[in-house]
Image (cartoon, helix red, strand yellow):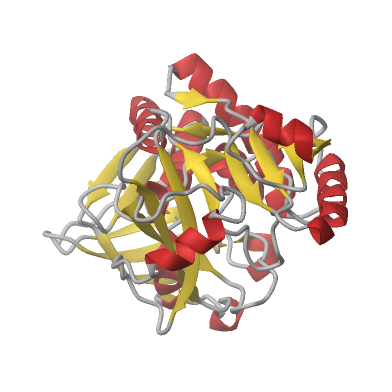
Amino acid sequence: MAENHVQTVVVGSGVVGLAIARKFARQGHEVLVLEAEDSGHHHTSARNSQVIHAGIYYAAGSLKAKLCVQGRKQLYDFCKTRRVDHENCEKLIVATEADQLAGLQSLCNRGHHNGVDDLRVISAADAMSLEPNLQCHGAILSPSTGVVDAPAYMNALLGEAETSGAMFAYRARLASVRVIENGFDLAIDDADRTTMTCSNLINAAGLGAWDVARQTMGYDHLKIPLQNFVKAEYFSLKSGKPPFERLIYPSPNAASLGVHSILDTSGQVRFGPSTSYLDPPQIDYQHNTPVDEFEGAIRKFWPDLPDGALQPDTCGIRPRISEPGAPLADFMIVGPNDHAVPGLVQLFGIESPGLTSSLAIADHVWGLM
């Protein structure tokens, strides 16, 4: 049994955990990151659309709105200065039915209110001249939307965190936490059955955040939110040239952004995601959505999708705190002022736009401490 003390422990080495570890290490903290897997590229951060979101969809004043707009600017700057592969490819949000046009203007107004000042509503003719394979009744053009090589971005964060002194422990699952005077007593399920103490504990475990919170003795479990896992499935083209140069999103509803067309940094196209709640919450990366459901959704904006052109691609799981059918909840990031446990920050429901917001989330968590 090894016993030691570290100033700040971050649980989880997904993109948000890495950004937080980098932030705290660069501020002079002694940082240890605990990761249950053998790397940080297994779950939500490595299985998403890799989109750099502009900040359009989120409620005014929400953390998602604030941190997405702030984080998008930081992310583009980070990628440019560190030469992380990315592309500012733009996005069209399209009305696939005439009665969605009013909603486009409302969505554009929301984006402007959030500080996304380059949005504009364009006509169907203008949208289809930009994208000849597109069929729509009108669209919003989002010039500041893009894509990033998420694994390369995470590797860059990891490198900078380590250069600043952060330490990483893999295959180190947090088994229990006890709130003690001036910090936390941790038991770690690793090869050495390590026990240790820390002054600050940041729960950025993503899908595992609820487990960490429940294992924390001295934390009010009534403050732990609803837990939901949402499977997100993607399909790609078996062959052929991508039909679009920009990202194509349908007009959203309250609970989903719909099945959309996205590009990666190599120019390959994917479609998705489907969204299905997993009951009970569990890790399940098997594809279950029938391909014809995807085909029907895609043909609303790309009517010439050939039969049999799709194949299963990425499947991810999102941590969500809203119920099925309910409007998507805001990020839940709670610090000492919320729960009266000094040195503790809990992050729940960090799904989209978590990747875009990651650097801004790290700044926000630093401010809570």
For residue 173, which quarter of the picture? bottom left
Residue 91 placement, left or right of 44? right
- Viewer-proximal residue, 66 or 278? 278
Residue 45 visible (yes or no): yes
Residue 24: x and y, percent? Answer: 49, 38
Q: Residue furthest left?
A: 191
- Viewer-proximal residue, 45 or 348? 45
Residue 83: x and y, percent? Answer: 43, 17
Residue 274 placement, left or right of 135? left
Vertical relation: 135 (above or below) 280: above
Residue 201: x and y, percent? Answer: 46, 56
Residue found 56% across the figure and 37% down from its top: 359
Vertical relation: 6 (above or below) 144: below
- Viewer-proximal residue, 285 or 329? 285
Residue 237: x and y, percent? Answer: 36, 45
Count of picture labels: 0
Residue 209 visible (yes or no): no
For residue 280, which quarter of the picture? bottom left
Residue 181 placement, left or right of 248? left
Residue found 41% across the figure and 55% down from its top: 234
Quadrant containing the N terminus is bottom left
Vertical relation: 303 (above or below) 319: above
